[in-house]
Image: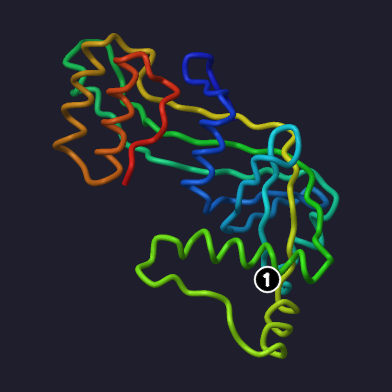
Amino acid sequence: MYVPAVFAESDRTTLHDFIERHGFGLLCSQHDGSPLASHLPLLIDRTHGAHGTLRGHMARANSQWRLAAQSEVLAVFSGPHAYISPTWYQADDVVPTWNYVAVHVYGTFRLVEDPETLMAIVQDTVTFYERSQPQPWTIRGSREFLDRMLQAIVGFTIEITRIEGKWKLNQNQPAERRRNVVAALRVNGGEQAREMAVLVEKTLRGEQGAALPPT
């Protein structure tokens, strides 16, 4: 990912927090020169590995797990984004741009063969995403049903070797233009625009690496 210094975010806690909030990632690999990609929910384990470890699972019918085994992969996590009109700057000699927040994670794709470890990945995924429900669902069923479920999926881990974040929030523009962008975003868009307005406003307070606003 092209990351000019003014947009770079390297604080590990901030990056891990972002992955935790935007965990539906794009897992990219290649085989014989051809790209492969799957959209998957991924969990961040902050304690395992020098930079953390991703855990997840995919359908056994998805050939990517077989082709990506023991190779380097890229996981892309995307956050709020918004079109920025040059009219908002109220200045001459300006052009449109797009503000966004993203994290790229690199590491080696390793299969999880042990059924108990695979079950733990599934259980942790369910627990994480059900925690906001009024009555969280839990995995249940007969042993035969659970065995069939596990046989239909493949687990994996990605120990992170490199992680990079890009918080592109008009930091290369003067403060007055950023204030104009904040005001315009608040009246010209939906939830994504409002989240972007909060993030741009944080740059005015010197909080470039601040956490994303709560939903």
Residue at 21% from the left image edge and 33% from the top image edge: 185
Q: How is the image coloured?
A: rainbow
Q: How many marks?
A: 1
Residue at 75% from the left image edge and 49% from the top image edge: 30
Work out whether 148 lies above or below 139.
below
Q: Please give the residue where the numbered disc 1 appears in the rendered image.
A: 59
Work out whether 172 lies above or below 211.
above
Work out whether 119 lies above or below 164.
below
Q: Quadrant of residue 86?
A: top left
Q: Nearer the viewer, residue 75 or 20?
A: 20
Element assignment for label 1: strand
Is 208 on the left-hand or right-hand side of 42? left
Q: Residue furthest front?
A: 135
Residue 155 % position (x, y): 73, 63
Residue 90 % position (x, y): 16, 16
Residue at 85% from the left image edge and 50% from the top image edge: 70
Is 172 on the left-hand or right-hand side of 93? right
Q: Quadrant of residue 13?
A: top right
Amino acid at circle 1: Ala
Q: Residue furthest left?
A: 187
Is 42 on the left-hand or right-hand side of 17? right
The quarter of the image holding the N terminus is top right
Q: Nearer the viewer, residue 194 or 1?
A: 194
- Crowd class of label 1 (few under 14; some 14 to 19; many from 20; radius 10 Å): some
Is 98 on the left-hand or right-hand side of 142? left
Residue 189 % position (x, y): 21, 42
Residue 82 % position (x, y): 32, 37
